[in-house]
Image (tube, rainbow, N blue to C red):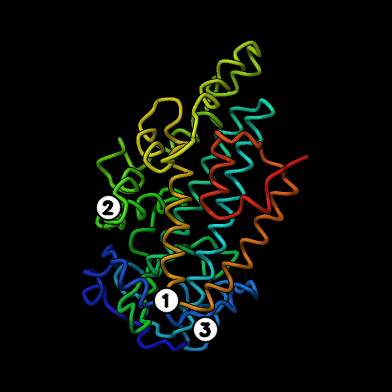
Amino acid sequence: MEIVDNTFSVSNYEDFLNKNLDLEDIKKGFKEAKVAYYEGRIALWRKLKESLESSGTIARSITSENGVLAKGCEITSLVLGEALEYFCRSFYNFYAQDKLIEYRYPTWSGVTNYYSSFFCIHSLLRLQGRCITAIWRPMGKKFYIFPYSFLDHEYVICTNGVRGKTAHDAAWWLYYEIYDGFEYPDNLNFESIFKRKYVGTVEEEIDFRNQINYEPYQGYDEIRDPNLIPSIIEKYESKKFTRNEIELLSRLTTDPDYRYYARSVLRLIFCYTLITELASENNELVSLIGNQKADLSSFLRQAKPRNDENMLCRRLQKLMGLETSSVNTG
């Protein structure tokens, strides 16, 4: 990794700030990416900090007017590793929220489901070669890293799009900004979770999480009136998934009772779909996915998700090729 220019003017990169990569460029850019950083649990921010400090670059010199141009195949590998990390976190939170519903904690299920989506959009952003991160930790200043020339492994580090925003606001805003222009013609049903026209506002999922978790008298109805629990649970569990899960989930992304659950798991499926697309060009990634499936299956054997054939927690295992080894038969 090298720092090419530590006073890189916004006039040089403003046209690339929110320009999405198409699928073929993503596959080409990640083709030679190495998985060692993921296996070694090495974060992008740590490597960037080392290179920036070696070049004499300090945090306050990186702004929305002057960024840093960095280059290196390892940046691409680090970004891919973090995409996989956040995908696994999303997967974990999806099964956690379903377990909370099962045990009659619907409000906390809604909050946990939010984090399934939140981690997934971080994974999806990294699958576009970009991320939001704090480089000089524990300092709170956030930086936006994005491709200047993805196929040449050139990246800009700046504060555009993140300055003045919370970590959550910046991530959701950037996710819709980037993916609104993305095309995945193999299955148009996925558009319901990344095109702006399918949501009221890009902040609505943050607002939902904030309302039920922080606002007085919002959420936690199961404590005030436990008799409501059966009807709350029914709204979640009445959805049956026997086939065409992606199509059904796409329709449910506007359902008043199920939309945020549908969006979170559909994003998870979409993220997995893109990762497997990348693996078609990257042999190291093929091997890693195989190992990761084994780990996820092992996790599910311990977590014991529900085994109803029609429930989404079971159908997701089938979609991801985890079903045989992970289904709870006890």
> Mark 3 is on which residue type?
Glu
Compute the Cα span from label 1 to label 3.
34 Å
Q: Which residue is mark 2?
A: 180
21 horizontally vs 49: left or right = left
First in residue order: circle 1 vs circle 3: 3
Q: Total label count?
A: 3
**Looking at the image, is 121 positioned above or below residue 203?**
below
* Residue ID at (45%, 82%): 32
> Which residue lies most toward the right here?
330
Residue 8, given in percent of the width and then of the height, sits at: 30, 80
Q: Amino acid at mark 1?
A: Glu
Q: Which amino acid lies under the numbered mark 2 shown in the image of this protein? A: Asp
Is there a contact, CB below 8 Å, between mark 1 and mark 3?
no
**Chain-order first, disc 2 or disc 3:** 3
Query: How packed is label 3: few (under 14 Cα within 10 Å), some, or many (20 or more)?
Result: few
- To which quarter of the image does residue 124 belong? bottom left
Residue at disc 2, secondary structure = loop
Looking at marks 1 and 2 on the same chain, the residue that comes earlier in the sequence is marked by 2
Viewer-nearest of discs 1 and 2: 1
Residue pointed to by mark 1: 281
Q: Is residue 209 left or right of residue 148?
A: right
The numbered disc on residue 53 is 3
